[in-house]
Amino acid sequence: MNKRFGFELEIQQAVYNQNTMANIINKALDISGFGGEVEEDENIDCWTLKTDHCGWEITSPALITTLENLDKVGKWVKAMKAGLRGRTERDLFYNQTGLHVHLDLDSIKWNDFNRSNLARAFVKFEPTLIRLNDKVRSKNHSYCRHLREQFKNEYVEQGFIPISDLREFLRDHDISTNNSKLAQIQNLIKKSDNKAIFSESNFWEEEIFEDHCNAINFNDYHGTLECRHGLATLNDEQIKYWIGLLILLGDAASKNRISLNREDMIEFSGIKPRNIKTNTQALLTYLRKTDYTKPWMRQLQRNVVRWINKKMAGNWKNTNWNHHRSVRW
């Protein structure tokens, strides 16, 4: 069975009425080569237009994962932009409109280990995933709750990190404003072993992956993994390569193991943040070391790596995540 993907694009409802929006979508479907007509009823086999908390939600059908279909998505976005001419991104979107991408978990052998490995990948690389979607998605909100925020709330503050001295130290001191205490923390890290935690095969069943509004979830009734980090936009390159990145991560997670160790957990807590460049380089290394067997996947890998480098080129100035509002605990 072929791998599949789909997406939901949210737009403010005040822009156009339903008939006008449907006509714009249908014309874009013809131009892009998808064909067909948008429907009101939710159906994974067709394009749909329905109301949502933010306004309109345009949902694609389950699309076979190919470079051709990704290119068609890009053409569809361009055609939508042309159809919504005169409307700026500010008119169409706001901080709670998103691009939600679904990866089909039923069409391939997604066992517990592979699902858990993918969950770990999303947690580990979340700083870069957030930054790739610009500042508007960097703020944790009720419809896209960041995974690291959930980790901090669920585990770090409960003293899950298995270093008793560290737990006591965190409880009694304000680490972020005291350099000497930060040095002591770093010494504790060095003395502790780097044994991997959260390596269990049922990691994907942790509560932070169940809530439908968390940044990723495995609890979607379509039988998919849903990623909600995405930025609602009509930038065709942004949407095409963002979806492509998630497809690559899904494939990589079925082949290359990802571990979350104590260093990672201390980073998640905000005590010893790594800079964004380090996180991005780790993501790029993970993608590059994956052996993508199909030629079009290797081409997608090259395209996505170039896109990430281009997007992140201007983000190296303020690299400490303490300066980024999404991780100010």
Image (tube, rainbow, N blue to C red):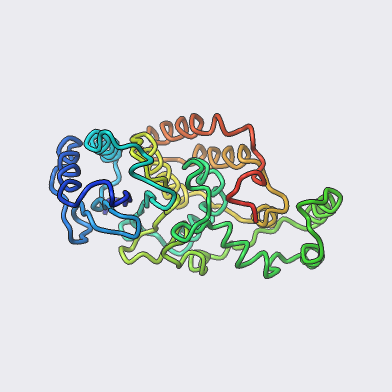
* Whether residue 78 can be seen here: no
| Quadrant where the N terminus is found in the figure | bottom left
At 38% from the left edge and 51% from the top edge, which residue is drawn?
97
Residue 29's quadrant in the figure? top left
In the displayed structure, does residue 89 sit left or right of residue 37?
Answer: right
Front residue (pair 155, 55): 55
In the orientation shown, which residue stands out farthest toward the left?
A: 36
Picture coordinates of residue 137, whole percent (x, y): 48, 48
Front residue (pair 103, 152): 152
At 30% from the left edge and 63% from the top edge, which residue is drawn?
222
* Whether residue 140 can be seen here: yes
Picture coordinates of residue 286, whole percent (x, y): 53, 42
Residue 227's quadrant in the figure? bottom left
Taking 277 as reference, is 202 above or below it? below
At 40% from the left edge and 66% from the top edge, which residue is drawn?
219
In the displayed structure, does residue 290 sit left or right of residue 157?
Answer: left
In the displayed structure, does residue 110 sit left or right of residue 81?
Answer: right
